[in-house]
Amino acid sequence: MACFIVVKIIVCVCVCVCVCVCVCVCHLKLDLMKQFDSQVNEFMDCLIEESTSLESPLLLSSPMSDKERSKMRHLRPSQDQGKQFVIRRSLLDELFEVNHIRTIYHMFIALLILFILSTLVVDFIDEGRLVLDFDLLVYAFGQLPLVVSIWLCMFLSVLVVPYGLFHIWASHRQASHRRTLRSLLAGFLYLLYQGIGLGFLPTYLVLKNGLPPASRFIIILEQVRLMMKAHSFIRENVPRVLAAARDKNSKETNTSLVIPQVTQYLYFLFAPTLIYRDRYPRNPYIRWGYVATKFMQVLGCLFYAYYVFVRLCIPQFRSISLQLFDLRAMVLCIFNSILPGVLVLFLAFFAFLHCWLNAFAEMLRFADRMFYKDWWNSTSFANYYRTWNVVVHDWLYYYVYRDILWMSEKRFRAAAMLVVFTVSAVVHEYVLAICFGFFYPVLFCLFMCFGMMFNFILHDQRKGPIWNVIMWTSLFLGQGVLLCLYSQEWYAQRYCPLQEPSFLDLLKPRSWTCHQQTLPAEHID
């Protein structure tokens, strides 16, 4: 009887302890949720206060004279004339101040460590030693001296030709009796330079010298960037000259304010924006530690991508041409490519849109760091396209979409949107075709077919969480399709080369007909 009472007491004590533990866990959960909510609320309040402080000087400033207002009109466009640059930080820099968000960054670092360890262990087992040669990176970034030489020629030409043509045209326009002829000649020379000097010649040099993929990406992406910068400079300043020419009472404006200084144009060529302004908001000093951190993160992302390809991509696609095509193999290939494709997407976003652009912005004291928005919260592809890459979106919006609306007197909005999608798809496909060395318009088809369709189906009125899930699912699947098909074509081009290909052979994907029985004795990667 005494033993029964003792056992009963012990059971009661255990039950009480369990109840207390459950209550403590519930309280701890509530405390954590309250702490997270308070941090998010404080974060949003700070953003609201900061935006209010940025706008209040414009609202509370004293009235300006007509002369000051005329000068300000040339220095900064009004709300309906162009993009407004304000002082603001990048979104990830603000989010990483929250410990719960920064933990996600730590998880990706842990995954990189596991990739490195797995590669080292496998190489040690296979070779009996540690292999640290990074032959894939050495191959991908080959011929760097030639890359630097081509880039210097492109940069110097962009610095001299567009600015020189504009300066000569703007300086002599008032005194000329043949303004229309001079304008047509200057416009023709500018278009000739854009098409041949900056468009054709770099592409020709890349193809003639057989640069490897990463080196090609450097040249072609810089080619596109400089072409967009030159267009922005001309597009923003020519209307100012024409407007000043109509102002008969302000000769000072014509000579000193309308024509930018070459230092302003030089700053714009390095600034992380594609929209030209004479002046941008600037920070008071440079944080060199921040710059070093961002460049180290870019280097880390580069090695991260290397290990993703070495561990997840090359073993899968190296022998892809040994198998005959069948639906099951294609489906498995696409779904097996989703994980590395998504990792490459995240790495490209973090390395370029966050780290690279922020590093140059910090060195130039460029204060407007909104290079992207919260695209991961998008519930529509329309919002995703606007927030993924704000730098390029601004250029497309102001110089393609709005210019088409201006020329059509705002009558063809759907056509303007179609032109924006077409321009973006063509440029993306051009970059991939030149850099990979073959034409396989997978990205173009995804842009023009599924991208356009989802842009209207998943529009801005879709606000529920389920639409965010659908957006992420579609994005993941698209990355798997891109990585799978382009990787298959890459190896097919090397396993089954054509001796004398015709024009139609260059357009037809090689992976549709390439089926080898054994791997080639020698292949680069």
Image (cartoon, rainbow, N blue to C red):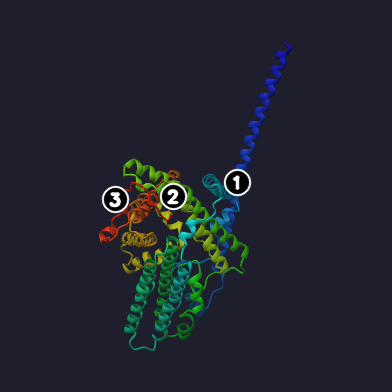
* Residue 467 shows up from this direction: no
Tell me how far mark 1 sits from mark 3, CA to CA: 56 Å
Dividing the picture into quadrants, the one containing residue 366 is bottom right
Q: Which label number is shown at residue 314?
A: 2
On the image, the x and y values in percent for residue 75 come to 49, 75
Tell me how far mark 2 sits from mark 1, CA to CA: 42 Å
Q: Name which of mark 2 and mark 1 comes first in the sequence.
A: 1
Residue picked out by circle 1: 36
Residue picked out by circle 3: 513
On the image, the x and y values in percent for residue 448 come to 33, 55
Tell which tag, 2 or 1, sits nearer the viewer: 2
Query: Which sits in the foreground, 41 or 485?
Result: 485
Q: Amino acid at mark 2?
A: Ile
Q: Amino acid at mark 3?
A: Thr
Query: Which sits in the foreground, 205 or 139?
Result: 139
Which residue lies at the image location 60% right of the left edge and 42% below the top edge? 33
Q: Residues within 10 Å of mark 3 (few under 14, many from 20)?
A: few
Q: Residues within 10 Å of mark 2 (few under 14, many from 20)?
A: some
Disc count in the image? 3
Farthest residue, direction right: 2
Query: Which sits in the foreground, 398 or 120?
Result: 120
Left or right of residue 9, residue 235 in this image:
left
On the image, the x and y values in percent for residue 287 come to 62, 65
Q: Name which of mark 3 and mark 2 comes first in the sequence.
A: 2
Left or right of residue 81, residue 419 in this image:
left
Q: Amino acid at mark 1?
A: Phe
Q: Is 375 situated above or below 464?
A: below
* Residue 406 shows up from this direction: yes
Tell me how far mark 3 sits from mark 2, CA to CA: 21 Å
Q: Secondary structure at mark 1?
A: helix
Q: Are marks 3 and 2 in contact (CB under 8 Å)?
A: no
Quadrant the C terminus occupies = bottom left
